[in-house]
Amino acid sequence: MTPRRAHILLAILATVAALEWISAASAYRSTLSQAAWDRAAAAIDPLTEPVLLGTPWLDPLARQHIPAFTRDAALVPDLHGVPRFHVLGHAGSPHAGAWSSELTEDQGELPPPILTASEHLGPLVLHHYEQPAAGALVTDLLAAPLQLRDDRGVCRLSSGTWTCKLGTAQVRPLEVGYRPRRCLAIHLADSATLEISHPSLLLGTVLRGHLGFADFNSRLRNDAPAQLELHIDDTLVGRWTLTDNQGWAAFAARTTPGTHAVRVRLTPLLAGTWTPEGYTDHPARLACLELRALTEAAP
Amino acid sequence: MTPRRRLLLAALLGLLTTLLLSLGHRQVGYVRDEGIYFAASRQYAAWTARLLTDPAAALTARERDRAFTTNHEHPAFLKIVAGISARLLAEPGPATTLKTQERAPAGLLPLLPEGAAMRLPAQLLAGLAVALLFLAGAALSPPVPKTSRLPLLAGLCAALWFIALPHVWFHAGLHCFDVPVAAATLAVVLIYRRALHHRGWALALGPALGVAISIKHNALFIPLLLGLHYLACLALARRRPTRGQLLPLPFLSMAVLAPLTVLALWPWLWTDPLGRLSEYVEFHRLHAYYNTEYLGINYNRPPLPISYPFVLTWATVPTGALLLALFGLAAGLRRDLSFKTATPVPSASPTWTAPLAGRPARDGLLFALFAAFPLLLIAAPNIPIFGGTKHWLTAYPFLALAAASGFVTLATSLQTTRTRHLPAVVLALVLVPGLWSTIDGHPHGLSQYAPLIGGPRGAADSGLLRGFWGHSVPPSILHPDASVGPIYLHDLAELARLQYEREGRWPADATPTGPARARTGLLFHERHMRTHELDLWSHLGRAPAEVVSQGDVPLTSLYRGDPATR
């Protein structure tokens, strides 16, 4: 090798190494102190709108230090009906944690929100957003007094759990698509149908919901589709066949504002899982359903 | 540097490595696989002890099979040695009566906790790898005056390139087989280089390969790669091979002595060698698929993206060090494969006992084969998913030697210029990021990433896995007096927990239980494990009491229930 080539190679190596020294000085330094979290908590506490994470891996630490992240409001099903929200990110993450692929997922078909301001709180950044197209939440079905029945009769509600002849249902967070989703967690016998109804629900211009399946291991071993029907005032307004491959599958139906009888019929088809030994009841695959009435501007 | 000083320095480096691993890894939690290896090691060592006191009874098929049936999907050698190490060096466990496990018995010279004593043989092998790399790296230097520092720097380059990587350092301290088999592969290849020229080394090659295979199955590929190298050497010599070269002693030694060594070191095989060998091969051929997160996607079925081992290597090995190794590989291949270079007239005639005597060694080709193969193998779409970087660590000693070779090439090019000290300065610049990364990553080296990807935070942003072995246990609960209560272990393997208990490190009140009955819960963060965290939320609330992090990135959460609210 000629000295000239050796010099060029050494210059390349030295440049890369210098970049690595600079990167190492930043990468190998813990940035999140108690003081940093206290500062973020103080900024977040007065906020009344949902606070979400733009740096998803911060999640356990955020829940440890900031009460807002332990509340149900942090588990929004999507960004519809959320005209204002806030995103906490790590300053070192791409775009200072202003956005994430998870938030893109939640955004669905909405246009990108407007970033109105970013507050730098040391190593954390609190971004403030507005979404004019989000509409407004009218009713959250999970918070409404619901009536549930299966093929064999009415389900009984006790301590937050509906007990039916052919299954159970309870509002709680379940893992769908590796994320916690607050929903009606439904366990139902094979081929059974669960009917969820409310005789006079205040509706807006659209009913939006999601159906997913929990958990990870059950999804691996059961790919059966589920059928979902939405009836308003005894009229079928939508029927969807959904599978676990769709993750947190969104569905929507236009509605007329006012009070209506709403009925959702869910047939998850198969509740068990397949193992090398065959089909078994346990572990069970749970359906995870949420539904909200929203008022949105006409498309 | 005199050969004696070189040997002395190599031995010192090896011992220093072992000492630092032995001390430093007391902070590294017991990984899932170690749990079963600990249990197997105790059984194997008990059988070995019985072999000395009552050989007739120990050698019956029933006794052998009873002792070696545990974890018979991996060869026994390292587990036997680890068990013997515990019998020699383990400190006794706590005097109090344990609930579920016997206390660790005292060894003859009780110096280390039982788990640390069982980790020691693997740590010694890591030290051996460092010593061998130093010697082999130093030997890459051309003849230089005794005062020249080139051999010293080349040796240090090879040794540090390898051991000063966070993932290598992490695995090097465990009672597992990944760094040991990398060390053994290096030893076999270095013996092979000598075996091509000397009868004694040719005879040693077979048993050495047998020992390597007795550590882990990765070594089964060694003879194939050595065969490729040998055939390439014959072809590139552009001379008709002699009869002796067609039936060379090094390969005969591997064919005959390696299987005998494997058989001798693995008593499980003695009852039904062929049947149990085929069972062993089938186990690994049809290995279960593990979950692994790669660029934000959880993979649990093949194929993994072909890019997987290459991207993960880049993400865990500093780029400057990788570039130096790639330059060394390219320069070595160019030198060894070029037909423009006239093959020198042999200084000695090849014979069957020294089949390449007087012929060029073609080290560049040899290093390239062993550096590339493990990565290419894991990149193959039909290879079962095996987790992270540990499965191609066997490539790293050869990348380290390639880096040393590249350094020597650069340094010799500038030997007579005014900038002759420049390569040494650049070498230091290139090696420091790895060392920095290793020190910063300890004791969570498995979750450490290289500077250019942004360390652990950058890797988490990119969706790369943080761990998979359930070992980053919060130190606050690893104390016998800690108040823990019934605990949900999540991915902390029960056998690993029992090892803490044997050593008196596990709180007496921390009885393993399900999430519904737990007062404390562990959660090791992995993408596909999220559902277990939600189970804990239901019973212990959503705010963890403690989070073990690496560079801010959560690895493990500890949940504590408030007894007043239960």
Image (spheres, coloured by chain):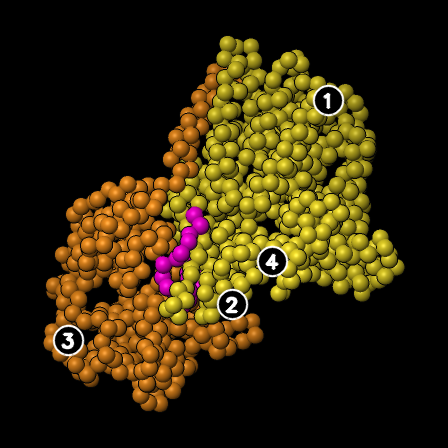
Q: For the residues marked 4 and 1, what is the alpha-carbon distance in whole angstroms? A: 46 Å
Name the amino acid type tagged 3.
Leu
Label 3 in the same subunit as label 2: no
Label 4 in the same subunit as label 2: yes
Q: Which residue is mark 4?
A: B501
Q: For the residues marked 3 and 2, what is the alpha-carbon distance in whole angstroms? A: 45 Å
Task: Name the quadrant containing residue B408.
Answer: top right
The letter of the yellow chain is B
- For disc 4, the neighbor class at 10 Å (few under 14, some 14 to 19, many from 20) is many
Residue at mark 2: chain: B
Question: Is residue B54 shown left or right of residue B321?
Answer: right
The letter of the orange chain is A
Q: For the residues marked 2 and 1, what is the alpha-carbon distance in whole angstroms? A: 58 Å
Q: Which residue is mark 3?
A: A202
Question: Helix or strand or loop: what does disc 2 sit on?
Answer: loop
Magenta span of residues: B526-549
Q: For the residues marked 4 and 2, what is the alpha-carbon distance in whole angstroms? A: 16 Å
Q: Quadrant of the N terminus of chain B?
A: top right
Residue B375 picture location, percent across and down: 55, 43
Residue at mark 3: chain: A
Q: Which residue is mark 2?
A: B513
Name the amino acid type tagged 1.
Arg
